[in-house]
Image (cartoon, coloured by chain):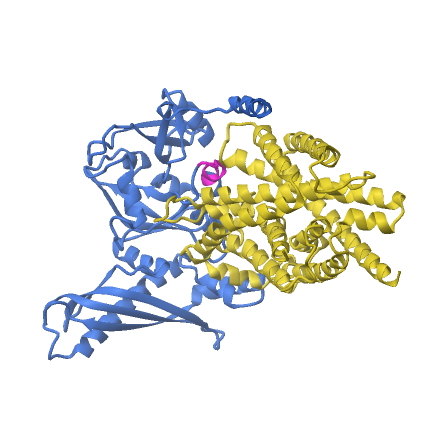
Amino acid sequence: MKHVLVWLSVLYLLTGCGFKDIDKRYLVMAIGVDKSEIKEKPYHVSLKLAIPTSQIQPGQSNTFHLISDDASTMTEAVRHLKSKVDKELDFSQTKMIVFGKKLGEERLDKVTIDWFLRRPEIQGIAFMALGYPSAEQVLNVRPKSERLPADSLIMSFDQEGTESSYIVTEFLFDFHRRLSEKGLDPYLPIIRPLKDTYLIDQVAIFDKEKIKAILNPEETRIFNELSKKIRNFDIETKTDKAQFALNVSSFGYSYDFDERNDSAPKLTMNVRIRGISEESKQSFYHSQWNRYKEEAETETAKRYLHVLRKLQSLKVDPIGFGLRYRATHYHGDKDWEKWKDIYPRLDWNIKVNIDLIGSGGVK
Amino acid sequence: MSRYFFYFVTLSMLINAILFVPRILMDERYDGAILSMILGPIIGGIFMYIFTSSMLKFRGQGLPEILKQSLPKTISIPLLLLLGSVSFISGALVLINYSFIVSRYLIPKTPIYIPLILFVMVASFGALQSTKTVLYSTELILVLSLPLLLFSIFKAYTNQNMNFDEVRAMIDYTWILPSWKSLSVSTYAVTGYISLAIFNRAFTGVQTIQHRWAVPCLGFCILLTAFFVPIGILGTDGVNDYIFTWVATADAVRMKYAFIERVVYIFLLIYLGISYLFAMTTWHVGSEMISGCLPGHHANTSAVNSVLPNAICCAVFGIGTVIVGNWLGEDDLFTVSSYWMMIRSPIDIVIVLSVFMLSKWRKTL
């Protein structure tokens, strides 16, 4: 009897919780934030809400409800959006945060992402991206193969479904870290809606405040290789002497700073690539295998150099050379001052070493 | 039996290193926090050596018995009351801190006193058990939760978003003299050995505790992990924006193919067990200290007059915890905790030195 009374008193405590059943919740799958036209209400917030279905079928069960509203803050927008729906908004499944391009061009910094960081139910590992032309249009796409709303976006960035070398992944916590880290600048992948699908093949490079430049797909790929050390990319060589493509199986690089000559600081980078030929105009066997290799090496080095020079001229550093400089030099804050002086006039010395391990199925 | 010593020492390291240390040391990360993490375990380790070897000389006796034998009542009773409350407060702070995290991340719409009341009830129930039961349950819960914790820490170290350049950039700031605050916080992480003041009653057959050198080493590793992993994941400057540093860090780690993608929930679950365990041991120590003041008190019997004083202590401090936890704001919590650690370290030193003196004195008698 004593035990029963104790447990009854415990049960009595449990009644006050704000518990809501799953059928009284609306799961927010993706959040889009755009710059609105109204001056007093700069945020145009769109939420992609999943409508539950009893059966999961590709292209059928990804029904969603897109609601949007203008407001002066994120909080206000969400509060007001709640009056547009009949259920409680639940952000615990939100894995996709899309910002409009216009917002990025104007200002995308800690203040903008503050709401996402403060809300405990928004995951630190949510994916972030930039929507072109607007986030709302990106969220409004309903891909045919999708099983759940916003699933195809999540799959693309996860590198779990497709493994494209053009898709750069960025997490919310990582974007936040890059916003304040000295020598590591933020970037965001760009999503462009096509009719029934998305095209994600560009990346926007930020200084600590707004977009500095948008890299084209070719540069995006190189950027992805350098910043994420991804492996699944290919190298095309197209010169007068040779024309072939390599599929890379392993990739790595290391670099160090050469400051022996104070007036001309140098960064020496060694890139190691192993790959198999995937497509070639000429036969590899019984010919100058080595010469082709060298052709590919100079071509690749040129491409890296192009992207690195571009980033350097924009005075941004999303790959983190500045951070590495701070890590390898031991004078605290002085390192950072020195790096700011060195970076604009840094000279690049890139050595690519390609290991051609085979010619594929044919000679 | 001596392995149980390592359980409660590790327990207090894990709790302090992850709940309090990051927040307080992060604020001073450019002002000597790193050196304090090197000095803290060394200082703590020296006191641990002195305390354990002097305590073990009193075979099977707890601090209340020792003080009663050798000091007049006017000194021993206030001292025991003070030590008991100290132990209670450190457990209560952990419970309050964890309830804040729970009410923020797991049950955002529930007022904080509800999880707090439930925690206090469970912790008090655990604290009322006999000393041996408390020790056995430390082993049980640690064995259950440590592998998962080690796995998630391993995941944090090895995931591709862990940036070791940030860690290396922080090393520039090593040779800066730490403030008293960061030094006492680092030392506090190694103070779990104080619980031996009561647990010594169960250590009857123990001549000496082997491998004591492992304690400062372990403390050093746990402190370094607790400090550098958040920096490597959240950034050298970005880390300063988060309140619950380790919860934010766990939130930034993902396990794609594990049974749950967000590591933060596994982490919160593990810490639920560990904070409960910590509160249980400290409250057990606290209630035994305070009821040790009573004349004719016999510990570890199921008689009413041995359990009742403990129950009253737990009830009083439990109600106090709920009231204080309800009343404290989040910003107060960290000010209170950091002041608490600054006071706590000198108290620990006083206990260690007095026990040391008593053990010397006893020999000459």
* Screen quadrant of the N terminus of chain B: bottom right
A104 or B167: nearer the eye? B167
- Figure quadrant of residue B206: bottom right
In the rendered image, residue A183, in percent from the top left (x then y), is placed at 47, 58
Q: Position of residue A116 (x, y in %)?
A: 45, 38
Q: In the picture provided, is B217 more to the left or to the right than A77? A: right
Does residue A253 appear left or right of residue B207 in this picture? Answer: left
Residue at 76% in and 41% down: B298
- Percent position of residue B239, x then y: 53, 49
Q: Main secondary structure of the magenta part?
A: helix
Front residue of A139/A219: it is A139
The quadrant of the rendering that contains the C terminus of chain B is bottom right
Chain represented in blue: A
Quadrant of residue B96 within the rendered picture: top right
Q: Colour of chain B?
A: yellow
* Residue at left offset 68%, top offset 54%: B203
Marker count (numbered)? 0
Residue placed most toward the observer, A239 or B353 = B353
| Residue at 61% in and 52% down | B13
B26 vs B314: above or below: below
Is residue B125 on the magenta stretch? no
Q: Which residues are magenta?
A: A113-121
